[in-house]
Image (cartoon, helix red, strand yellow):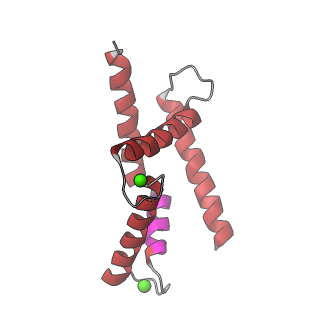
């Protein structure tokens, strides 16, 4: 039987992560400039639609592990599990299966700084 406290704790971390993503200014500005294909400082509906289509295509290709053009529930689960495991390993650096909220926030700040650095190198 699973420990209900741990499950609640994990879903709380998920909420923190998804909430932080939508409020991440660097992430948002990066996405905005990505959609501005002709670099005129404006995003037309056509540019936005093109960006969305490319993003969906990339996501679908990523999900289709065996490249048969079909995404099975197993592929969907496996790819997302891989993502969850990767994120967890970044947070749980000592491998004790527990992370503090501070560690999650610290990791988020690190990712932000890296993203900003990457963006500045590109510009
Ligand atoms: Ca534009
Ligand atoms: Ca497949």
Residue 47 visible? The answer is: yes
Quarter of the image for residue 18 reads top left
The residue at the far top in this view is: 1
Q: Does residue 33 sit above or below 23 in this rendering? A: below
Magenta stretch in the rendered image: 25-34
The reply to whether residue 23 is visible in this rendering is: no
Residue 87, placed above or below residue 52: above
Q: Residue furthest front?
A: 68
Point out the image quarter for the C terminus. Answer: bottom right
Residue appearing at x 48%, y 87% in the figure: 38
Q: Is residue 70 magenta?
A: no
Residue sitting at x 37%, y 72%: 53
Instruction: Estimate the x, y position of residue 52 in percent, counting from the top left.
Output: 37, 70
Q: Is residue 41 above or below residue 3?
A: below
Closest to the observer: 8 or 59? 59
Instruction: Name the foreground residue: 106 vs 60.
Output: 60
What secondary structure do most residues of the magenta stretch adopt? Answer: helix
Image coords of residue 60 (percent x, y): 40, 60
Q: Quadrant of residue 121?
A: bottom right
Q: Quadrant of ligand 1?
A: bottom left
Q: Nearer the viewer, residue 116 or 2?
A: 2
Residue 29 magenta-drawn? yes
């Amino acid at each position: 039987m699973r420990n209900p406290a741990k499950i609640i704790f994990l879903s709380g971390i998920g909420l923190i992560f998804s909430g932080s993503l939508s409020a991440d200014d660097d992430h948002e500005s990066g996405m905005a400039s990505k959609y501005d294909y002709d670099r005129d400082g404006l995003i037309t509906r056509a540019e936005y639609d093109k960006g969305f289509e490319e993003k969906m295509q990339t996501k679908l290709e990523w999900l289709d592990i065996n490249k048969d053009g079909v995404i099975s529930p197993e592929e969907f689960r496996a790819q997302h599990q891989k993502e969850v495991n990767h994120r967890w390993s970044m947070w749980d650096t000592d491998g004790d299966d527990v992370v503090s909220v501070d560690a999650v926030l610290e990791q988020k700040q690190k990712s932000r700084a890296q993203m900003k650095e990457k963006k500045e190198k590109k510009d």
